[in-house]
Structures are given as C-alpha cells and as structure tokens.
Amino acid sequence: MSTEWYTRLEKGHIGGVSEDVLDAVARALRLDDDERAYLFDLARSSRRARRTPSRRGDVEVPPRVRWLLDSMTMSSAFVRDGRTDIVAGNPLARAVFAPMFDSATADERGRPNLARYIFLDVGARDFFVDWDAACAATAALLRAEAGREPRDRALRELVGELSARSPEFRDRWAAHDVLMRHDGVKRLRHPDAGHLELTFQSLDLPLPGRAVHDLVVYTAEPGTASEDRLKLLASWAATRSRATRPTP
C-alpha cells in the first residue's frame, strides 16, 4: 500500500475496499482504536453513491435529555455534536463556560462552537490552562467527524474557516490526528471563580439517523478547592436561572 493510496482513501476517491484489506492496512500502520475506526469510516463514506456535499440539519435534542441536563445541579453538562457545536447545556455549564458562551465566536442564536472559541478567540488561551492540548484534541475530534461525514457542507465550511484564520488549526489539521472521544482532566482559569480542575467524561447519546452527539459532564473531586468553587458557580447559576424563569 502506498501513501498515495491512503491519501486517495481519505479524500473519498476509493470505493469497494474490503474489510480484510482495511484490517491489513490498520495492522501495517499500527493504528490505535480511534485511528482504525477512522479508517473504516473513510471507507464506508467512500462507498456511498451521493457525492455532492450536503448541509445536515440540526438534530433536535429530545426533552428527556434536556431534563437530564437540568437535573445535574452539581455537574456542568452539555451536549456537543460532531462539529463541536454546543447544542444544549445546563445552567452550570453556562456558568463554568461563560467565556465561551459570551464569546463573539458564538452564532446568532448564542450557541457556541468549541472549535471556533478555542482557535479564534484570543481569550481561550487564558481560559484553558492547557490550551495547546485543547487545540490538539479539538482538531482531532473534527478530523474524526470528517471521516464519518466527509460530505457535510457545514463541517467543510467550519474547517475552511478555521484553516483560513488560524495557523494553529492548520498545523494540527495537517497532523491528521483523530480522536473519537475525549475524557480526562480539564484545568480552567475562570474569570470569577478562579482556578478549576475538573474531571470530564463524554458519553455517546443515541439519536436518530447518523447523528453523533456526546453528553460531556464535568465534575470536581470531592473535598477540593475546585469543588468549593464549582458549588459557588452552581449557586450563582441557580440564582440566575430562577431570576429568568417566567412568572406564573
């Protein structure tokens, strides 16, 4: 197998490749689980007959998921789609990630996009203590989504925008790293609460069609200063939520 062959596969120009061949490619290149899944996604995408880029409509977040989010009063939780749009979140997520929600990179509905914030808002460099790691992980998540949905027009436009405006994104996109799921520890420098060290976990949400959404939950280790600060943000979030609730 050649580099040209793999490049053509990534661009969706090769169809009919058997799973045995793909498995051999994965072994030869010593791909990890995420990279192997990405390779198979590319092959599946190349087999589809429809080649014209399309704009996928937003998938509605079911009420039961929104109820779940609102019930998590001591955890910051949001739903993220494959393009890293934050499509739903609880009040504590809005409080913890206030710089992202308030950023000019959010869309006209006030919905933030994680990739746009990280790469295009200079404030993200201060908010994310490990900004370089956040850049690498976010670009790799988008690369994985491009393997699943290579003809998603909105995704192509996002990648094009980030490539044109951010040299950091161009460098990381050129690395071709892939990440299907992102879990671990996030360190934030919150403008009101100060330093937060939060453990986060992403969980797949079963939604209609081919939609890929993650429920991402951030919690603090019990007994730590970060837990105290998270409780403070939760109190503020609950107060603001009651203040904005319609009067019966």
Image (cartoon, rainbow, N blue to C red):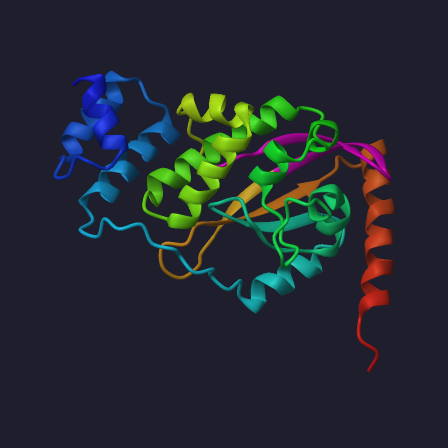
- Above or below: residue 139 compared with residue 158: above
- Magenta span includes 183: yes
Q: Is residue 56 left or right of residue 76?
A: left
Residue at 12% x, 39% y: name it: 16
Name the image quarter holding residue 11. Answer: top left
- Magenta span includes 131: no
Residue at 55% x, 48% y: name it: 85
Residue sitting at the far front: 164
Q: Position of residue 144 (x, y in %)?
A: 40, 36
Q: Position of residue 221 (x, y in %)?
A: 75, 35
- Above or below: residue 3 compared with residue 38: above
Q: Give the quarter of the figure containing the N terminus.
A: top left
Q: Nearer the viewer, residue 120 or 31?
A: 120
Residue at 54% x, 32% y: name it: 165
Q: Is residue 39 left or right of residue 140?
A: left
Q: Nearer the viewer, residue 209 or 65?
A: 209
Give the dominant element type of the magenta stretch: helix, strand or loop. Answer: strand
Q: Is residue 243 left or right of residue 36?
A: right
Instruction: Magenta stretch: give its range.
Output: 180-200
Name the image quarter holding residue 26. Answer: top left
Q: Is residue 171 left or right of residue 219?
A: left
Q: Position of residue 170 (x, y in %)?
A: 48, 25
Residue at 87% x, 59% y: name it: 239
